[in-house]
Image (spheres, rainbow, N blue to C red):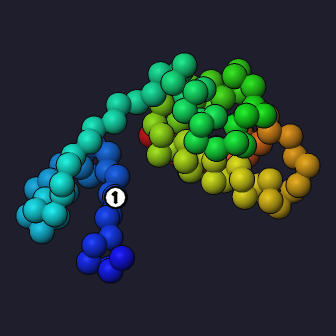
Amino acid sequence: MTAQSLPVSSVAEGSGALSSARAPALASRVLTWQQVSRLDGKQVLTVLRMFHPLWDAATDTDLLHADATRARGNFRTWAKITSHAYAALARSPGTAVGQALLSRACSRLGPTP
C-alpha cells in the first residue's frame, strides 16, 4: 500500500467538524461524513467492554459513575480514560480496576467543561 492510498480518519466534535467541512482542501478529500451521537448508559457498558478488555473487570456502577461525572457518553473521552487507566496499570501492576483507578485516570483529563 502506498502512502497515497492510505485511508485517513479524522474525528472532530462540534465546531471542529464544521471547520473541517468549510476547508476546501479537507472537504474535497472526505469520502463520507459520519455523525456519532453520545452513548447512553447501556451503550457505554456494552461499547467499553467491546472496545478494551480492561473494562471487563470494572463494575457497571463504577463505569456509569465515571460516565456521568466525566465522559458524558463521549467515546473520545472514554478512549482517553482508557489510555490513562492502562498507563496507570502499567506503572502499578496489580491495581484493581475500580473506582480508584477510574478516578486516577479521569483526573488526568483536565478540567471538565
Q: Local crowd at mark 1 within 10 Å, few (<14), some, or many (≥20)?
A: few
Q: Residue at x 31, y 64 (%)?
A: 7
For the question of whether residue 23 can be seen, the reply is no
Where does the image place residue 6, in percent across and percent down from the top left?
32, 70
Q: Given the current orientation, which residue lies at the most extreme front position?
A: 1
Q: Position of residue 57 (x, y in %)?
A: 78, 34
Q: Where the N terminus falls, by quadrant?
A: bottom left
Look at 35% across and 31% down and name the residue there.
37
Q: Is residue 86 visible?
A: yes
Q: Is residue 110 left or right of residue 7?
A: right
* Residue identifier under label 1: 9
- Which residue: 77% across, 42% down? 101
Q: Is residue 62 left or right of residue 34?
A: right
Location of residue 5 with respect to 99 vertically, above or below:
below
Which corner quadrant of the image does residue 49 belong to?
top right
Residue 59 placement (x, y as % from top left): 75, 25
